[in-house]
Image: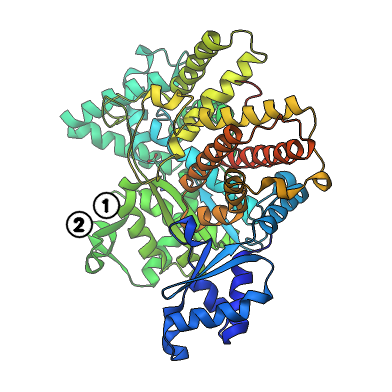
Amino acid sequence: MLDFKDEIAEGISKCIGVEAEEIKGYLEVPPDKTMGDYAFPCFRLAKTLKKAPPMIAEEIKTIMDVASNLISKFEVQGGYLNFFVNSNALVKEVLGEIDKFKENYGSSYIGQNQNIIVEYSSPNIAKPFHIGHLRNTIIGNCLYKVYKFLGYNVTGINHLGDYGTQFGKLIEGYKRWGDEYDIARDPINELMKIYIRINDACKEDESILEACRENFKKLEDGDDYCVELWNWFKDESLKEFQRIYDLLGVEFDSLNGEAFYTDKMDEVEEILDKAKITKMSEGAKIVDLEDKGLGVCMIRKSNGSTIYATRDLAAIKYRADTYDFDKCLYVVAYEQALHFKQIFEVAKYLGIPEKCVNGLEHVQYGMTRLTTGKMSTREGTAIKVQDLLDEAISRTTKIIEEKNPDMEDKEENAKRIGIGAVVFNNLSNTIIKDQVFDWDNVLSFQGDTGPYIQYVYVRTKGVLENVGYIPKLEEIDTACLLDETAIDVVTTLYRFGDMLKSVTEKNEPSILARYLLELAQKYTAFYNEDKVMVDDEKLKNARAYLTYCVQTVIQIGCGLLGMEMPSKM
Ligand code: ARG
């Protein structure tokens, strides 16, 4: 794709003999369209060139004026030189690229030879998949897809929480009261009840807690009974998680969870010992990070058990060795910020390549709140994600029944709209922000919602069905698309690839979600202003073609967010 910024930077560079790369870094997008598409703040070079900024601006303008057919107008405003892109060139470029790349428009090779790990979802077995894990899964899935689209070599890892003292507790509870519960019928819920009960018992009686810790130690040591129970908890949980992943269309390249690192922790401990950063404290082995304001990172408890952090350190070493990653992204709630700061600090001593240490990144997201407040599995107030997704679909079905009872593919469309609404809702605001889940907002066909975007997509389909064909690019007279609402759409389409790059630079899927809203709104304005079904064939074809472009980009963008498009609405 032609990069207007590059062209302008090249042009300026030729005029004044400063490197184009440097110039490009200075170019700005003015806050107001009347000031042009790009602006060059000449004061940046005042010192180097020993001239006043307005003078520099005038000089560049005079020289460049004749040179470029991509820029239609130059304007000096104070110390700024403003550039107005030649709209016709822009339209030609955008339509041409979409025609050429189709469903790959916006993709690139910038990620070639770079290995990215996206760790996401990571629910805990024998516990419900809660609404935080849902948000996590949706965010991670989007990042996974966008990195891939930009040519990175991506590995998606579901770091299952399948290890830890809680399994000692669960085993203890099961031993005591297993036959009081109908576990075969509804495994996770029944196990949760046992878990809550044993937790209460532990609070009352220290010796029960001790027994639980012992069980976990036995599990680590490979005790038959404990291992068998644990395997069964894990199988049942995975079956339940899989139903959710299927509904969301989410896949992973690896399900290596915490337990996978059981036999990989001794080595890590040895490396840290050799680096002389561990020490004993009250019988436990720790790394003291107090001088960095990060408290202490425990490596091994006094009873010899490893902990969450130990397994994470082993995972970092294993992933560096196995995947030689350039970036390893941890999509995990902000509550665990300290944990990640600690393990990233300790990772400096693991003897892994510098680039891996620098590539570790915690992608934090905020809590989802329902009216009942924050949910904790220990108190058992969590709502089940499976229920939430089912409800999204059934509520959508109801809306369809009311509005459009004769719709074809009602069931499939209700699923796509309901799930799409939940997905979009999770990504529509900066992910670090806490969010409130409110059914009416989530499922609304208007406003900042997934259904609104799907609705606009379905409209583009309807428009093209009315027209009866998708015109050929060669038949398009780009001069028909130079009015304001059309250019607005084209400019937005032009930004698609760059916008995706900023999604990966900031690890922020909401940039894509917001972009799609903007595109949908701009298309709606265009559609209202510039009727497509007009008698003038040239006009009709051009407008239909732009409609096709919008449809293509909404489809690509929503796909990257993790949404499917309905056929009707
Ligand atoms: N299983 C954990 C939880 O549900 C999240 C795991 C995060 N990933 C990690 N590498 N520690 O809270």
Instruction: Identify the secondary structure beneath mark 1.
Output: loop
Which x, y percent locates residue 225?
Answer: 45, 30
Residue at x 66%, y 56% (from the top left corner): 90
Earlier sequence position, callout 2 versus callout 1 = 2
| Along the line of sight, the residue nearer the viewer: 245 or 549 | 549
Disc 1 marks a residue whose amino acid type is Ser
Quadrant for the N terminus in the image: bottom right
Residue at x 58%, y 35% (from the top left corner): 529
Which x, y percent locates residue 169?
Answer: 32, 32
Residue at x 39%, y 66% (from the top left corner): 272
Quadrant for the C terminus in the image: top right
Q: Is residue 156 above or below residue 195?
A: below
Which x, y percent locates residue 488?
Answer: 57, 47
Residue 212 in sight in this render: yes
Relative side of 528 to 69, left or right: left
- Name the residue beneath numbered marker 2: 282
Which x, y percent locates residue 221?
Answer: 43, 44
Quarter containing ligand 1? Answer: top left
Identify the residue at the far front of this view.
536
Disc 2 marks a residue whose amino acid type is Glu
Instruction: Identify the secondary structure beneath mark 2.
Output: loop
Residue at x 55%, y 24% (from the top left corner): 417
Cα separation between marks 2 and 1: 7 Å
Identify the residue at the far bottom of this view.
50
Mark 1: few/some/many CA within 10 Å (<14, 14-19, 20+): few
Query: Do callouts 2 and 1 mark residues in contact (Cβ within 8 Å)?
Result: yes
Residue 238 in sight in this render: no
- Name the residue beneath numbered marker 1: 302
Mark 2: few/some/many CA within 10 Å (<14, 14-19, 20+): few
| Along the line of sight, the residue nearer the viewer: 10 or 277 | 10
